[in-house]
Structures are given as structure tokens and as C-alpha cells.
């Protein structure tokens, strides 16, 4: 059992105003692995007050000095990299190899890309229309509230905290109470980097408590939230009274369009991507749409890939998937698998219950449904587990229509070796991100969606801009 940790407020570790213990559950064992305190209104108030008091001095700090602080955070992160990987493996069940390569690696990746973007960022520049003295300035928006999820803890924490620091904002972070250990470790890294007191504050809590208090607080100028679409809507409503900027990165139901001319690894790549992190990724390709002439071949590859996917203890090294986060999520996934069976989808891999040999822990069988139709619940709802829905299409136009027939719009995927089709469909697919043939979107590319996936653009210079107000200036003296 990890020792209970306090909150980080105004540069110090402080006890909560009122003791409300919360057990953090190891999803691999269903047993408590740590105890944290949940904050209340007094804790939120203290953290916001510290951030507000530190705001003017931090905003006035030269960008070069703020970047130097972030570089020290990166050095601390790299020095404690294994601790970070172990924390995430424990708190949310990421297999240790994945925790080392992807979960912890997401933190260094984003910090490095933000440093690069910050060094090229033009904080004030000419408007460019030929009007002398017309300038555009980027200035920190002020105190920001950051609310992060449990599924990719450091991915989302670094996508919010680091650009906020670079922009000159002060902040209060509320990490998920389901997976707080990595964020508490990250707070130690920030403290050891010499970030001034009050600039970064952390209060543990739940959405109804600290989350709602941040969303409605009059001294918070912006909320940056990653989580469910339902919670994103509630935050938007709560924040409206104080006219905050609200930046939302929400759910997804990604389509993966597989044409008959795809590369030979396309289907296996798509299935493995969906199963990664036990399917708990908002950008997962959870709907596979396959050209009919290739459909039966794709089903064989998909079923074989699922059969080869091992499920096991996250503390063990090797390529396998771990548990999902908690009992509630396990039950939800089981209910959706049951709905797929009842609604007539053809089960070709996995199914209900735990994998063989695992009678404890929130482990889900890697599951694939074939012959799905657009109205099925498993095709409409975000499952957030290792469950893939496959359906055929007959034409390019039908494929695009099926892909876009969803309230979500985060990430879509395309598999074809036809360059003209690739470029055509990359523009037609309705999502904030589209990826063809397993290629990278590039270092510092923005992450975010459209429609019910929110409209955040996190990462690189776009991520820094989200924490800035744009000031239009006339009469600037050269």
C-alpha cells in the first residue's frame, strides 16, 4: 500500500481541509494500492487563491525563463522515468512494457515537442497587412483549471500543464481520482524544477466536487478538460455563468476504412491498435469498415489477431494487454458485448466474461464482432474496451458515409495503396485527425476532434495558443 499523499498548493505539500479518504484500486487485483484524500471547497479555494496570487509575476516572466523551467521538468522526468512507468502500471493497469514505452513515453514526447514549439513561438508579431504598428500579441489567459482522465495519465497532464506553464498561466490540476499516483509524482518533478510557488497546484478530488468547483469558480479563466462527452457537456453548462473559455477533448468512435488494395499488415495493425491499452483510448479505431471483396479475408486476419492477443498481469513484461480500469467499466463493457450478441452481430472472437485462467481483476476478453450494422449499440456507443465492430461496404461513397455516421469526430483511419484515393478521403472523413496506412501525424501535431469529440487542439504551437488570449494592437512603435 502506497502512503497517503497530501495536496500540492502554493509550493508546499499540505493536508486537506477535511479528511475524506479514497482508496485507489489496483485493477489487476481489485485490491487497494493507495489511499488519497479528496478535496473539498476549502482546498479548491486555497489552490485557486495561490494560483491567482502567483499569476502576475509568472505572466511577466520572460518566455525564455519559463522554457528553462520546463527543460528542468523534462530532466527530472527523464531521471525518474521508471518510477513514472511503475506508477501508471499500478494505478490503471497498463502492462509494464506499454507503461515504459507509451504511457511514460507520452510525457517526454509532449514536453520535448512543446519546448521546440515554444522556442519558435512568436509572442508578438506584425499583423502582416502592411499597416505600420499593427501587431498581434499572445498573452496568458490567467488562472486555468485542468481536469485530466485516467486512461493516459501523463499524456493528458503534459498536454495541459506544460503549454499552460509556457504560456505564462498559473493553474490548478485535478487528476482523475482513479489514477492519481502519476500526477502526484509529476508534482514532485515540478517542485524540484524550481517552478515558483503558486504557479502549479494539485488538488485531488472527484468530478462532482473539485471538478465542479473549478468549473464554476469566478477566478478561473479557462477549463481544459479531457474525458467523457457527458461530463464535457456538464462542464460547459457549469462554466457558462462565468464566461470561461472551455477546451474539451472528449470521446471518439473512430472508423478504420480498409480497402481491398490495403497493405498486408493493415488489418492486424488496426486490430492491435484497438486492443492497445485494453481499448481504453478515445482515438481507438473501434469500427473497422472493409471493402466487400476483401471482407472474408479481413475477418480471418482479425480473428487470428484476437486469438494471438494475450491478456495478463500488467506487472509482467512482454506483449499483452492488461485489465480495464475498474468494476464499473468492466460491467459496462460486458453489457455492450451482450447487446452486440442480442442485436445480431456475429461474434468471431472473445465474448462475455474474463479470459481463461483469470478469475480476479478487471480483465476483458479481446472481442470482435462481424456483420455489424450502423444502428447497433456497439457501433453507436463508445465502448472503451477491447471490442471491435466490423462491417462491409461496397463503394468509396458508402465507406465515407458509414464512417461519418456518428456523433463523434476524433480520429479516423484509412488503409489503401491508391494515392489519389488516399488524398481524396483524408479530406472527406469528418474528424479532427485522419491517419492513412499507419503513418505518423508528426511531432507537435495537434490532437483533437470535432462534433461530440470536442474541439480541443492540444500539442505543439496549437496547444500553447489555447492558453493564450490574442491581443490586437495598433500604433506599436518600432
Image: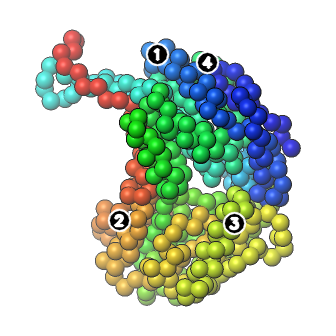
Q: Is residue 91 above or below residue 81?
A: below
Q: Residue at point 49% right, 37% down?
A: 216
Do we see residue 472 in this rendering?
Answer: yes
Question: Which callout, 4 or 1, points at the residue further toward the start of the chain?
Answer: 1
Q: Residue 56: which numbered mark, if any?
A: 1
- The answer to which image quadrant residue 399 occupies is bottom left
Which residue in the structure is indicated by mark 3?
330
Q: In the drawing, what numbered circle is on residue 429? A: 2
Can you give x and y, in whole percent of width and height, for residue 366 in the image? 67, 73
Query: Does the rendering let one see residue 316?
Result: no
SS type, badge 1:
helix
Q: Is residue 304 above or below residue 439?
A: below
Between disc 1 and disc 3, whose residue precedes? 1
Kindly give the residue lying farthest to the right in the view shown: 1
> Closer to us: mark 2 or mark 4?
4
Label 1: how many Cα within 10 Å (few below 14, some 14–19, many 20+): some
Residue placed under numbered mark 4 in the picture: 197
Q: Tell me how far mark 1 sits from mark 3, CA to CA.
A: 46 Å
Q: Nearer the viewer, mark 2 or mark 3?
A: 3
Residue 327, picture quadrant: bottom right
In space, the residues marked 4 and 1 are separated at their CA atoms by 13 Å
Say if mark 2 contacts mark 3, CB within 8 Å.
Answer: no
Q: Which mark is residue 374?
A: none
Please state, as top left, top right, bottom left or bottom right, where the N terminus lies in the image.
top right
Q: Position of residue 4 (x, y in %)?
A: 80, 36
Pick whichever, 266 or 331, lies toward us.
331
Residue, x 51% and y 21% (percent of image)? 52
In terms of sequence position, does the residue under pointer 1 or pointer 2 come before the other? 1
Amino acid at each position: 500500500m502506497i502512503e497517503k499523499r497530501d495536496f500540492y498548493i502554493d509550493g508546499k505539500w499540505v493536508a486537506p481541509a477535511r479528511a475524506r479518504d479514497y482508496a485507489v484500486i489496483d485493477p489487476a487485483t481489485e485490491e487497494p494500492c493507495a489511499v488519497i484524500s479528496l478535496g473539498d471547497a476549502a482546498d479548491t479555494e486555497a489552490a485557486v487563491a495561490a494560483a491567482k496570487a502567483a499569476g502576475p509575476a509568472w505572466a511577466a516572466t520572460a518566455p525564455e525563463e519559463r522554457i528553462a523551467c520546463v527543460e528542468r521538468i523534462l530532466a527530472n522526468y527523464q531521471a525518474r522515468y521508471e518510477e513514472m512507468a511503475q506508477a501508471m502500471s499500478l494505478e490503471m493497469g497498463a502492462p509494464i512494457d506499454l507503461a515504459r514505452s507509451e504511457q511514460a513515453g507520452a510525457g517526454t514526447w509532449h514536453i520535448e515537442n512543446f519546448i521546440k514549439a515554444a522556442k519558435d513561438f512568436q509572442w508578438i508579431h506584425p499583423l502582416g497587412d502592411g499597416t505600420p504598428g499593427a501587431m498581434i500579441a499572445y498573452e496568458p489567459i490567467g488562472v486555468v483549471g485542468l481536469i485530466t482522465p485516467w486512461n493516459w495519465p501523463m499524456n493528458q497532464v503534459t498536454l495541459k500543464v506544460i503549454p499552460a506553464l509556457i504560456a505564462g498561466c498559473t493553474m490548478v490540476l485535478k487528476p482523475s481520482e482513479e489514477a492519481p499516483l502519476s500526477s502526484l509524482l509529476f508534482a514532485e518533478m515540478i517542485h524540484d524544477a524550481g517552478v515558483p510557488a503558486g504557479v502549479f497546484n494539485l488538488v485531488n478530488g472527484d468530478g462532482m466536487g473539485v471538478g465542479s468547483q473549478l468549473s464554476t469558480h469566478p477566478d478561473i479563466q479557462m477549463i481544459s478538460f479531457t474525458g467523457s462527452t457527458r461530463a464535457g457537456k456538464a462542464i460547459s453548462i457549469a462554466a457558462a455563468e462565468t464566461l470561461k473559455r472551455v477546451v474539451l477533448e472528449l470521446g471518439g468512435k473512430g472508423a478504420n476504412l480498409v480497402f481491398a488494395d490495403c497493405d498486408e499488415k493493415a488489418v492486424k495493425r488496426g486490430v492491435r491498435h484497438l486492443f492497445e491499452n485494453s481499448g481504453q483510448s478515445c482515438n481507438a479505431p473501434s469500427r473497422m469498415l472493409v471493402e466487400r471483396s476483401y471482407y472474408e479475408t479481413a475477418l480471418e486476419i482479425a480473428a487470428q489477431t484476437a486469438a494471438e492477443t494475450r491478456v495478463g498481469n500488467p506487472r509482467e513484461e512482454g506483449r499483452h494487454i492488461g485489465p480495464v480500469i475498474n468494476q464499473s467499466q468492466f460491467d459496462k463493457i460486458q453489457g455492450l458485448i451482450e447487446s452486440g450478441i442480442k442485436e445480431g452481430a456475429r461474434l468471431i472472437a472473445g465474448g462475455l466474461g474474463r479470459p481463461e485462467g483469470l478469475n480476479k481483476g478487471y480483465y476483458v476478453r479481446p472481442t470482435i464482432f462481424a456483420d455489424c450494422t450502423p444502428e447497433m449499440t456497439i457501433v453507436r456507443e463508445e465502448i472503451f474496451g477491447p471490442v471491435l465492430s466490423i462491417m462491409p461496404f461496397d463503394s468509396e461513397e458508402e465507406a465515407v458515409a458509414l464512417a461519418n455516421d456518428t456523433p463523434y469526430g476524433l480520429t479516423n483511419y484509412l488503409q489503401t495503396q491508391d494515392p489519389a484515393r488516399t488524398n481524396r478521403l483524408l479530406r472527406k472523413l469528418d474528424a479532427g485527425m485522419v491517419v492513412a496506412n499507419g503513418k505518423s501525424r508528426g511531432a507537435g501535431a495537434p490532437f483533437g476532434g470535432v462534433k461530440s469529440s470536442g474541439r480541443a487542439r492540444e500539442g505543439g504551437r496549437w496547444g500553447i495558443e489555447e492558453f493564450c488570449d490574442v491581443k490586437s494592437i495598433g500604433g506599436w512603435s518600432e
